[in-house]
Image (cartoon, rainbow, N blue to C red):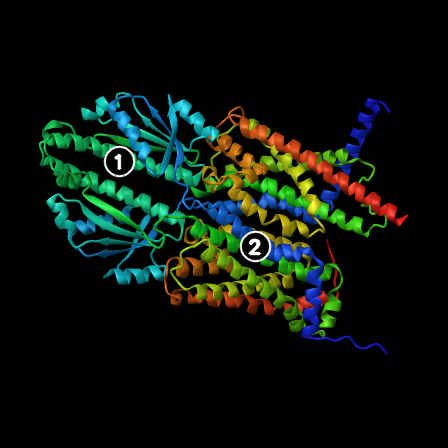
Amino acid sequence: MGLFRKTCHWLSMTGRVFRNEWKLVLGDMGVLLFFVALPLVYPIAYTLVYNPEVVDNIRIAVVDNSRTKESRELVRTVDATPALEVYDYASDLGEAKKMMAETKVYGVLEIPADYTRKIGRGEQAHVPFYADMSLLLRFRSEMAAMTDVQMQMSSKLMPVSIDETPLSALAAGRELSLPVKSESHFLGDTEQGFASFVIPGIIILILQQSMILGICLIGGTSRERRRRDPQGLDPKAVNEAGPWATIWGKTLCYTVFYLPLVVYITRIVPEMFSLPHYGSPVQYLLFLLPLLLSSAFLGLTLVYFMKERESAFIIIVFTSVIFLFLSGLTWPHYATNRFWLWISDLIPATWGVDGFISINNNGATLAEESTNYIALWILTAVYMFTAAWVYRKIAVSSRLKALRKD
Amino acid sequence: MTQKPETGFMAGLRREFRRMGRSRAYLFGMILVPVLVAVTFMSLLSEGLPRRVPTMVVDLDHTPLSRSVIRNLNSNEMIDLVGEAESYDAALAQVRRGDSFGFFVIPADFQKDALSLRTPTLSYYTNMTYFVPGTLAFKGFKTIAVSVSGGVVKTALQDLGVGEQTMAGMLQPVSIDNYELGNPWMNYSIYLTPSFAIGAFALMILLMTVYSITMEIKDGTSPEWLETCGGHMPTALMSKMLPHTAIYIAVGSMILWLFFGVGHFPCHGSLLWLWIGMVLFVVANQGLALFIVCLLPNPRLSFSICALFGILTFSFAGFSFPVESMYGAVGVFSWLAPTRYLFLIYINNALNGYSVWFVRWWFVALMAFPVVAALGTQRLKKALEHPVYVP
């Protein structure tokens, strides 16, 4: 058989697997649940959870031992911050602590008795703030608010005290303020919102995980059919196709199936909730192509471990949580040890999340994301070979079973 | 005449142990995964607080004052200056490449303007698409910006002969000192690791409970199961689920031991109460899964609901984003998850050291789950008597 005929034969086999796979996907409600419902519903569910974006109006208690005009002004300043809300005054720290234990408040500001006297004398007044540490976001908002209060009080009180020094002569005629100003800029997630931070990354993980789950469900079900079949063959599969035609036919089917979902997840979801999306669609759609391919091949490789249909739930679902942390989104890579970095390198979503949020949130170009892009293509190649090996093994074990029957 | 096979609780128990021995899925899902996830998170987050955020500086001034700003940046504990970029664009490119999480810009003529009170502006940029490093870099940059500003005034005042003491009161009349209760190291791991580990544990209990019951329907063995237990539903369920309960409690105890024995996580409350909470949490999750199976005695639907619920629990249980800040309609879901209650018991009693009295209701809530589940068992009985498998 000539090379041309061989190629034609291979292509027609791939085409048959492709068509057959469509039938399998569309005929299996469980698979459709993973392939369609999950990518449609999860991004919305997640965004609804995080859409309030910022943690504000955290209730705190105040123990005011000074009870002066100045201390009340400090409390008013604290109350006026968007992040904090003075829930109540407590007569002493003991009462405040009880309010914390009842989770009525998540912080206590204790104004010392000598607060006003110190300010009047031009000394520094120290005000302790006791913060609840049970949630990072709450603590973070409290800290930022307290820093702002501190600076506001400074700029309010400083000109008064500086006026009393010779420095005021130097600044004659000019409004006295801090000699150096500073301004902060937030890149990618300008509002520092939680949904804006987590959703663009998580949707990439959803693409990978939902695809792997669906593929494993198909694989596990096929394994059950092979077990029941006297010949050890899956009657619903294209058994004449070789392993390469099988994995390519399947992968192309899944990839084509996912294209509209990718558009939905990367274009429509951010639009719906006004999440950051500055990147060019051409750039990130091109970027996501190897993510889809490598996820499909990884899924086909994992089919090896699927003893039955339900294995997909037991083996795959929990990995999402670990993959989220390994992706570097919630826990930075520079604080991750070598071993886990190495594992994370094997997961397509790690590269996918990093590259996609750079393009989507920070407006990077595909060229700037070349490391991530190349890594995704390398993973595609690696998992293509492992998937081919798995499907060869499946074919061999079927043939062995048939031989034993004879 | 053949002897009539023994029926009842003990027979059911023996049958369940035989079933568990036949499939490796039980070993994997009930023991391996929960322990593996706990160990993974402990190891992954062992750093505690990801300090030393890689950042850059753009110095457009090149004067002694700008050098001293860079020295300040270098000595800040939050950030790690990995290099200098010659322009804003170059620094931004590094951020996009992921090599740095932010940069600090010292403007041209900084020293000249600062010393002649012309108020130059220091700018700093942090990449908030990575929340934790972005936040830490922001914190480090802000500290430096404020201290530089103070430093300049200080130098000027010193020249005028103002004393050190007066100066502090002048530059920062009010200093708010933060005390991080229960976690002065600001260690994220001690609350992230346990919460994610129990979330994963809950997910696996839900899935494996559904697995153990619906496989009987799928394989058509459920009538035989009921028969072995004398057709008595409570006996059948008890004999199936109690062995699992025992295994889960052992696994849960091991996880607690890993945290507090091996990982030396601080416990300011009572370990015994936390353990009791864990036992109730195991039973609550079994109850929740049973309830779902009773409602939908079909493997596909009950598996999907449990997987969906188990995964979303990580979000709405409020590990990272507080429940009281969520939309009310979303926040209510958190109360349906046993994970939420054990999480509250953990952070309030073990982490913050509040008395058990303040978390009493969460124990009661956990106890409610199996009670609710018991109400639906008659519906399940019908499905078990006439198993229909829809893949």
Q: Which residue is mark 2?
A: B34
Comparing B285 with B256, the one in front is B256
Q: Which residue is mark 1?
A: B146
Secondary structure type for disc 2: helix
* Label 2 CA crowd tier, 10 Å (few <14, some 14–19, many 20+): many
Amino acid type, residue under disc 2 in the picture: Pro
Q: Residue at x 27, y 63 (%)?
A: A95
Residue B376 appears at what percent x and percent y?
Answer: 62, 67
Residue B205 appears at what percent x and percent y?
Answer: 59, 59
**Is residue B53 in view?**
yes
On the same chain: label 2 and label 1? yes
Q: Residue at x 22, y 50 (%)?
A: A127
Q: Is residue A374 left or right of residue B152?
A: right
Amino acid type, residue under disc 1 in the picture: Val
Q: Quadrant of the N terminus of chain A?
A: top right
Q: Pointer 2 and pointer 1: residues touching (CB < 8 Å)?
A: no
Mark positioned earlier in the residue sequence (2 or 1): 2
Q: Chain of mark 2?
A: B
- Distance from the alpha carbon under mark 2 to that under mark 1: 46 Å
